[in-house]
Amino acid sequence: STSVSSSVPESLQSFLSAPKKLLIDGQWVAAGSGKTFDVYDPATDQVIAQVAEGESADVDLAVSAARKAFDDGPWSKMTASDRSRLIWKVGELIEEHAVELAQLETLDNGKPFSIAKAADVALAADMFRYMAGWATKIEGNTIPLNVPYAPDQEFHAFTLKEPIGVVGQIIPWNFPLLMAAWKLGPALATGCTIILKPAEQTPLSAIRLGELLQEAGIPDGVVNIITGFGETAGAAIASHEKIDKVAFTGSTEVGKLIINSAAGNLKKVTLELGGKSPNVVYDDADLDLAIAGAADAIFFNQGQVCSAGSRLFIQKGIYDDVVAGVSEIAKNLKVGNGFHESTQMGPLVSREQFQRVTGYLKAGLEAGAEVSAGGASLDRPGYFVQPTVLKNATAEMSVVREEIFGPVVAAMSFENDSEIACRANESAYGLAAGIWTRDISKAHRLAKAVKAGTVWINCYSIFDAALPFGGYKQSGWGREMGHASLENYLQTKSVCIQI
Ligand code: ADP
């Protein structure tokens, strides 16, 4: 019997009060240990659900089911066209249940409902539909040979693109449903089978998605969902001998642990990790656009975005105006419960994240950064932090070097074009960058020079299922979305026939 918090929409009550189990081989089952853990509403700090705590033994069962569905079929034996139809259906069901899924995201993660519906849920549906299209377009090549030591022989050679097999997918809490879609989409399109582990802070929408996958007709064992903690369930996935590949999104620190765990059987690894992305405003930019864009780049999703524009570089002549403009927006943002219609920014996801962000604020001020807006937490239940603009920040401060993963931007000024590329690249990370200018040549020059997987010019946080996303440097390995992401789930087999 779960005590359900007062802000929970009535439509979710029955879903929430039913036991939240693991999805293994098409069955919803309790964890082998019988253990559960509490899930919180970050806007109220109240428990909203108890969820099965999967561990290593549960991962073993999920891997057996995924191996069977891959090695013996049905998934690997189904035609690509049949797979495509089922994946498309998942996209349709997500759209059909958009309100409910968005409510679950708001309840579990804290983000404003309107954003959850328009961004998270809509992008998730789109991802499945985009990937449904790719399922039937995975092709190898025919390759003419010219073998120097066999000049008299004739060959017919070609490549096959084959699914990599059973994949483990470990996802974070900032976009719970969307990260599941980014992971599942290409894996299903290529014919892999999956063990998905949602973040312990936000398992609810993945559980609901599991039900929708079943409703769409995805066969038993193709997608298995193990809720649980990183050090137990996550680590068991990363080190499992019978998993062929692991895909992880989360912190750079845990990404490095995943690589070590994966070394045992040399499973393939892709990683989407942290960022500290530069957002560069030149003095010839459309300032209204740039100021609104700079605010959105950091405050979207409470700043809990790996590609957030957290280092704001402003050209000297407009520094004061841009800082004032972004600060004005920060002060006027409506912070509150994501279910309230007026809310523009919700709470942070968890108590732990709240402590982390407020800790960085304290460190920034001690190091000499000045508060231009915000700078404090809100004195009320829930994990609320003010949207914050820090000015006069310098490169050695922790608020400039390290990923805060909260609504905190560090503003710095720069003099000229020749200096900015170097300063923008002064980071261990390389996930994204923003450029605001009316000078198209300048924009192209910096876009080329910046070491980042995504560059947004006169816009920010634009995501599309077709546009690859991923990191340079310590922001990760491989790309998600776009046809680039299919490669993560395929192996190439060369076949050579003597004629
Ligand atoms: P954050 O610190 O922002 O919570 P993490 O990188 O810790 O981000 O978490 C992202 C995902 O990685 C979550 O699903 C989490 O449970 C999982 N995770 C955390 N630690 C490990 C680990 N040692 N091995 C595997 N997965 C982990």
Image (cartoon, rainbow, N blue to C red):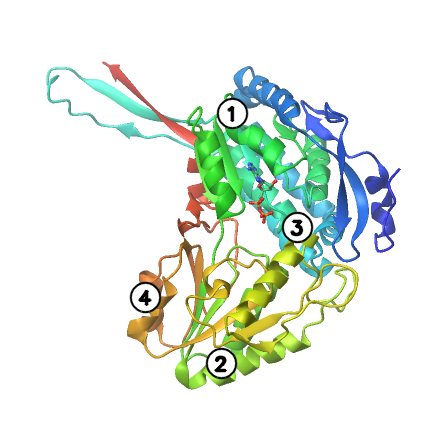
Please name the residue shown 63% across and 69% down the image. 387
Name the amino acid type tagged 2.
Answer: Leu
Which quadrant would the N terminus be assigned to in this image?
A: top right
Estimate the x, y position of residue 450 in percent, counting from the top left. Answer: 35, 61
Please name whichever residue, 3 or 442, is drawn nearer the observer in this view of the structure.
3
Crowding near the residue tagged with mark 4, few <14, some 14–19, many ≥20 C-alpha atoms within 10 Å: some
Are the residues flagged by discs 4 and 2 in contact, CB closer than 8 Å? no
182 versus 336 height, above or below: above
| SS for dot 3 | helix
The residue that mark 4 highlights is 422
Whichever of labels 4 and 2 marks the residue nearer the N terminus, that label is 2
Name the amino acid type tagged 3.
Answer: Val
| SS for dot 2 | helix
- From the viewer's perspective, is the residue at label 4 or at label 3 nearer? 4
The residue that mark 1 highlights is 243
Are the residues flagged by discs 3 and 1 in contact, CB closer than 8 Å? no
Label 1 and label 4: CA atoms lie apart by: 41 Å
Name the amino acid type tagged 4.
Answer: Cys
Name the amino acid type tagged 1.
Answer: Ile
Estimate the x, y position of residue 386 in percent, counting from the top left. Answer: 66, 69
Give residue 121's mark.
3
The residue that mark 2 highlights is 287
| SS for dot 4 | helix
Whichever of labels 4 and 3 marks the residue nearer the N terminus, that label is 3
Q: Quadrant of residue 414?
A: bottom left
Please name whichever residue, 273 or 450, is drawn nearer the observer in this view of the structure.
273
Label 3 and label 2: CA atoms lie apart by: 31 Å
Whichever of labels 2 and 1 marks the residue nearer the N terminus, that label is 1
